[in-house]
Image (cartoon, grey):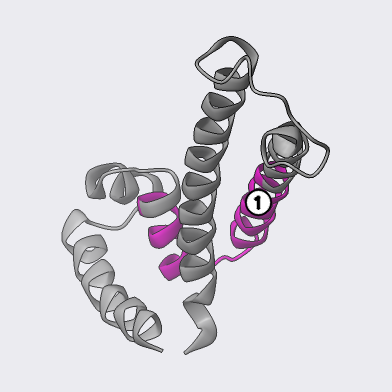
Amino acid sequence: MTKFRWLKDYRDTELEIMYLEDNLLRTKKELKRYIDGDLSGTKLTPESNGAKLEEHIERIEKEINYKRNCLEDIKNTVKKFEQIDHAILYSRYIEGKTFDEIAEETGYTKGTIYNKHAALMKVVKYIDAI
């Protein structure tokens, strides 16, 4: 059942990036408070959280870049698969294509793509449950 583990990994990594981007935004807003906001008069010590915000921002940005590279690695790996199952999942969930577009690209009928997709979703739901 690890055949489609890449899709779960891809989705999990996308969610991690979304969380990190939100965290980055909130951290930058907090830093702005210390620079020219309501906390601009606060005296910071080297141990204070405010003094460490720039370092924290840098760490988050590095982690986001790392996760984005992981997504690219997954994409590149999956592109090497020749099975129609992988092509359907990649086209649908990574590229965001419709069943019509996938059918046209693969040469299968829309009904065949839809049925294969439905069967694949059962496998993916099983993987998600593990």
The residue nearer to you, when weighing 93 against 31, is 31
Q: In the structure shown, which secondary structural element does the residue marked by tag 1 occupy?
A: helix
Magenta stretch encompasses residue 13: no
Give amino acid for label 1: Lys
Q: Is residue 106 visible?
A: no
Q: Name the quarter where the C terminus is drawn.
A: bottom left
- Figure quadrant of residue 97: top left
Q: Which residues are magenta?
A: 64-92
The residue nearer to you, when weighing 4 against 70, is 70
- Residue 101's x, y, as percent? 30, 42
- Figure quadrant of residue 28: top right
The residue that label 1 is drawn on is: 67
Q: Residue at x 35, y 52 (%)?
A: 92
Magenta stretch encompasses residue 66: yes
Left of 94 or right of it: where is 70? Answer: right
Q: Is residue 110 visible?
A: yes
Q: Specify the principal SS of the magenta part.
A: helix
Q: Residue at x 45, y 49 (%)?
A: 94
Q: Residue furthest top?
A: 36
- Residue 22's x, y, as percent? 47, 39
Q: Residue at x 61, y 15 (%)?
A: 40
The residue nearer to you, when weighing 14 against 117, is 14
- Residue 76's x, y, as percent? 67, 53
Left of 46 or right of it: where is 41? Answer: left
Left of 122 or right of it: where is 105? Answer: right
Q: Residue furthest left?
A: 111
Left of 106 or right of it: where is 111? Answer: left
The residue nearer to you, when weighing 44 against 5, is 44
Q: Residue at x 24, y 50 (%)?
A: 99
